[in-house]
Image (cartoon, rainbow, N blue to C red):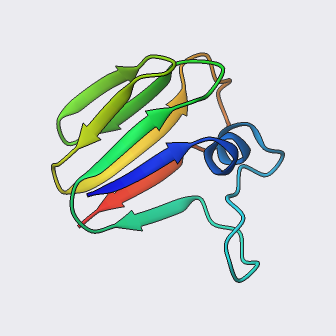
């Protein structure tokens, strides 16, 4: 099982100027792909809204959410302004 800690990487993606996650090879990306179950751990300053195959879930500050269903999830801050790009998580 993977644990995706939403600290600097997701904070930059959700609130950054271009909404891009810095990648290891220097190419910005807003998509993360993982195989198998993923646990989200929210260390943001606001709750997260996770939209996916199982519906919409709210992840409170300091809590965990395990995503087991395969599919595409869109992660945004709860009070994020419109027009900002969500972080996309693909589970295969």
Residue depicted at x 67% and y 35%: 83
Depth check: give the residue in front, 7 or 70: 7
Residue depicted at x 68% and y 24%: 81
Q: Is residue 28 above or below residue 73?
A: below
Residue depicted at x 36% and y 30%: 64
Q: Is residue 72 above or below residue 15?
A: below
Q: Is residue 30 above or below residue 83?
A: below
Judged left or right of residue 2, residue 25 is: right
The mark tally for this picture is 0
In which quadrant of the rendered view does residue 27 lie? Answer: bottom right
Q: Position of residue 74 (x, y in %)?
A: 42, 43
Q: Position of residue 84 (x, y in %)?
A: 67, 38
Judged left or right of residue 4, residue 92 is: left
In which quadrant of the rendered view does residue 92 lie? Answer: bottom left
Q: Position of residue 25 (x, y in %)?
A: 71, 83
Residue depicted at x 72% and y 64%: 22
Q: Position of residue 26 (x, y in %)?
A: 76, 78
Quadrant location of the N terminus? Answer: bottom left
Q: Residue furthest bottom?
A: 25
Judged left or right of residue 70, residue 78 is: right
Q: Is residue 39 above or below residue 43?
A: below
């Amino acid at each position: 099982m993977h644990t995706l800690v939403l600290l600097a990487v997701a904070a930059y993606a959700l609130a950054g100027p271009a909404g891009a996650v810095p990648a290891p090879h220097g190419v910005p990306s807003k998509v993360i792909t993982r195989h198998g179950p993923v646990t989200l751990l929210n260390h943001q300053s606001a709750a997260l809204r996770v939209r996916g195959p199982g519906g919409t879930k709210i992840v409170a500050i300091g809590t965990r959410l395990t995503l087991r269903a395969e599919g595409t999830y869109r992660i945004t801050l709860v009070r994020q302004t419109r027009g900002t790009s969500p972080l996309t998580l693909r589970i295969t």
